[in-house]
Image: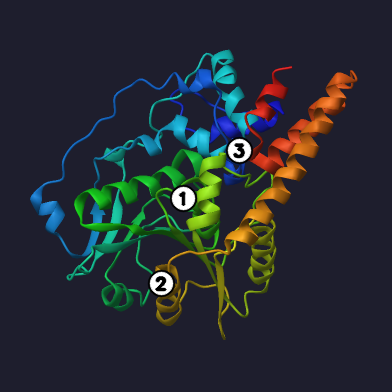
Amino acid sequence: MLWSLVMAVQSFNHPGLHLPRHGFRITRYATGPLALGALLTVGLSILMSSATADEAGKVGLLQDEIFSEYSPLSSNLELARRSLTPLTAAELPQRLAQLGKGLSEQPINLADERFTLYVPSQAPPNGYALLVFVPPWQDAHLPQGWTPVLDRYGVIFASAARSGNPETILGRREPLAVLAAQNVMHRYSVDPQRVYVAGFSGGSRIALRTALAYPDLFHGALLNSGSDPIGTKDAALPPRDLFLQFQGSTRLVYVTGDEDNLNRALDAQSMRSMRQWCVFNVDSQTVYRTGHSAAPAAALSEALQTLFKPASADAAKLAACRADIESQMAATLDHVESLFAGGKREEAQKKLREADARFGGLAAPRSTELAQR
């Protein structure tokens, strides 16, 4: 467990903390609430500034844009609460204290970051839609052929530089996506119900994790040639209130080429896990005569039309599915408790870690209470 925790720690920005790096897999950890003591450490003020009138009025392709607005949603503590399992998140402050380190308030220094935007010249009556794009590459560029589609539907595109596959998830890729959304919404008139996250290849996997952790910000995700199952140690479930929102109001659109066999198989696994976890607002489209490449304009157009549809689910079906998960989780945690009561601590701890990875934030606070034993 210590190694897992060290790998999770490394995904954050810690001035002066030097740990071995093992690629971006080190940050592929799930979501869950921090212990109360960690939450009480939030106290530093957040730097805020206003966009100028010139910034708010710029349209077209805008490169090397600099943002200045920080958000509580992008803080290290909030990233941990949403994007680590409950047990890992609860142990993080203690582990850092043992190393003589602490979390900075924010993982990102916006003065050092550059973003690419595309802003259509005409805003829809109810405000722009927003598509935050997580790339696999390091530069921030607009995929070929997307401009006319963005114009047609009134969608702002935003992408951060240095947020590709070599970067850590919690240290850069996820908070950059959140900060891009917050700053664009500050500068422009954006319909908050039409804010989405997208990605291609490795960036698509980050888009899925970001949508899972932030269903109160992103109301849908365009997953282009990259996905994973949820409810695993790599993509565990967020805190209960957030996961219920993800189930009920987030729409997922998988877009993959018919010749991209690996990612078609991964999409099938991911969509199957969505059904198992009561996520029913899921659509899939195949791009014919296409391998592993970013979605062409026609596929983007179809995906946006699908994202714009309000998410809905059969209430009875959703309730029955949720009840089944609750029953499974209760039985699992009851078994852990019986093992503790019988003095089988090592086996109990092992089963508790498995439950933490599988049920994530749904199992808290009972899982964290059991861990305290």
Mark 2, residue position:
304
Q: Looking at the picture, does residue 59 appear above or below residue 16?
A: below
**Direction from residue 297 to residue 344 in the image, left or right:** right
Residues at discs 3 and 1 in contact (Cβ within 8 Å): no
| Residue 226 vertical position relative to residue 105 in the rendered view, above or below | below
In whole angstroms, how far apart are the C-alphas of marks 3 and 1?
14 Å
Residue 168 visible in this rendered orientation of the protein? no
Query: In the rendered image, which quarter contains the C terminus?
Result: top right
Disc 2 crowd, CA 10 A, few/some/many (<14, 14-19, 20+): many
Tally the marks: 3
Task: State the SS at label 1.
Answer: loop
Residue most toward the bottom? 289
The amino acid beneath tag 3 is Gly
Residue placed under numbered mark 3 in the picture: 361
Residue 326: x and y in percent read 70, 44
- At label 1, the amino acid type is Pro
Which residue appears at 86% of the width and 19% of the height?
A: 341
- Of callouts 3 and 2, the N-terminal one: 2
Residue of label 1? 215
